[in-house]
Image: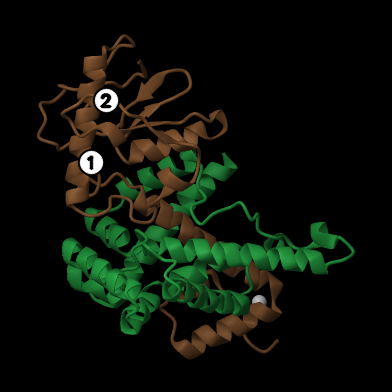
Amino acid sequence: MLKPHLTRDSAEQYILGALAPEKAAALEAHTLECEPCAVLLQEEALLSEQLTEAASTFPQEERVIRPAAWHARRAVTGAAIAALAAAASLALVLLTGDKAPHPSLPDSLDSRPPMVAVDLDDGDSPTKTNVVACPDLATQDFCTRKAAERGLLVMNPGGTAEVPRYEAHTGLPEGALSARQPVSL
Amino acid sequence: MEASRGTDEESLSRKALAGDRGAWDALVARHHRRVVVSLLARGVRVDRAHELAQETWARLIQQQQRGLLTELRLPNLALTQAAFLAADDARRVRRESISGAVEELPERQHPVDPSVSAERRLLSEEQLSRAHAALAQVSPSARSVFLLACDGQELPHAEVAAKVGLSVQRVRQILCEVRKKLRTALEEETHA
Ligand SMILES: [Zn+2]
């Protein structure tokens, strides 16, 4: 084994794409012969993927517009729900007007856990797809989290709705729409 | 600037969907490294990771040529395709280890769960909030460099540097510093 072992720094530089091609090639060749270094490279790659997840979910104001301080009691009327949904739709409009808010996590609502778009049937507001159900208890947390990240309302089997826990720059009056607690439907 | 990049990616995707080879090349150039890194993170050997990444693009282009691609969202589609190929690979390895010695393989060679998609969560909720807290602690400029470079959109470091008015070298230095802080934050959690 002629090449030097990897260091955390060299592995990191490799993952970042900062190594000259010949150095990258030498590093790669070494990991094929040296299991500990292969593991080190895997660790750095995994960290890189984790950091991408952390970065893409970081609640940056430019990226995630948060409907401010939601406070509500459990007993919320249908009208209030519709108002919440409308606020969520506003947040969505603002988000989509920019760019995809979570570019590395598209499709997750559509493809992963059972999650059903709920028809609110409230006529004139474009809120129909802003409420989703997370009917599967096994994946409910994930489903809820994904929905919250997208500013969607969530209906759970228990009949509760969770709203995005975002603070916001939506231009909405502070505290006008709120629900930090789960609210019943 | 964000918008122009988004538009750029969108227009490249549109052209690629229409079969424009140049657009495919540009998209591959942009996202290839991430695909390789995602495979390495799954414990795929580096030589095989390169092969699977190539295969990933070949499959996507093939699907496009057959009219099976209606939408092209990168890097996720490529990451998912690569994950499937890695899972296939792992299944084949498992079949070939007739003695059923899967358990004896080093951790990193364990077959990938085929049900695991590219969108698997790598961080627990707690790890995520620790990482976010650590990120909130770094200087705003370092944070924006990190977010620009690492949000999954594969903005080249040269473009990040141009946006923030720093050298590529400085950008990478910052990335390494932030990375160390986040690594520490994530490790704290596991030792807690
Ligand atoms: Zn070594």
Q: Chain of mark 1?
A: A
Q: Colour of chain A?
A: brown
Q: Say above or below: A119 vs A45.
A: above
Mark 2 or 1, nearer chain start: 1
- Colour mode of the rendering: by chain
- Residue at 70% in and 72% down: A35
- Specify whether residue A65 is in view: no
Q: Quadrant of the C terminus of chain B?
A: top right
Does residue A84 appear left or right of residue B128 in this picture? left
Q: Say above or below: B145 vs A20.
A: above
- For numbered disc 1, what is the local secondary structure? helix
Q: Nearer the viewer, residue B18 or B125?
A: B18
The residue tagged 2 is: A121
**Residue B87: x, y in percent?**
64, 62
Q: Colour of chain B?
A: green
Does residue B172 appear left or right of residue B68 in this picture? left
The residue tagged 1 is: A92
Displayed quadrant of residue B105: bottom right
- Residue at 70% in and 86% down: A1
Q: Nearer the viewer, residue B33 or A6?
A: B33
Does residue A112 appear left or right of residue A170 in this picture? right
Q: Nearer the viewer, residue B186 or A135?
A: A135
Displayed quadrant of residue B70: bottom left
**Residue A157: x, y in percent?**
48, 22
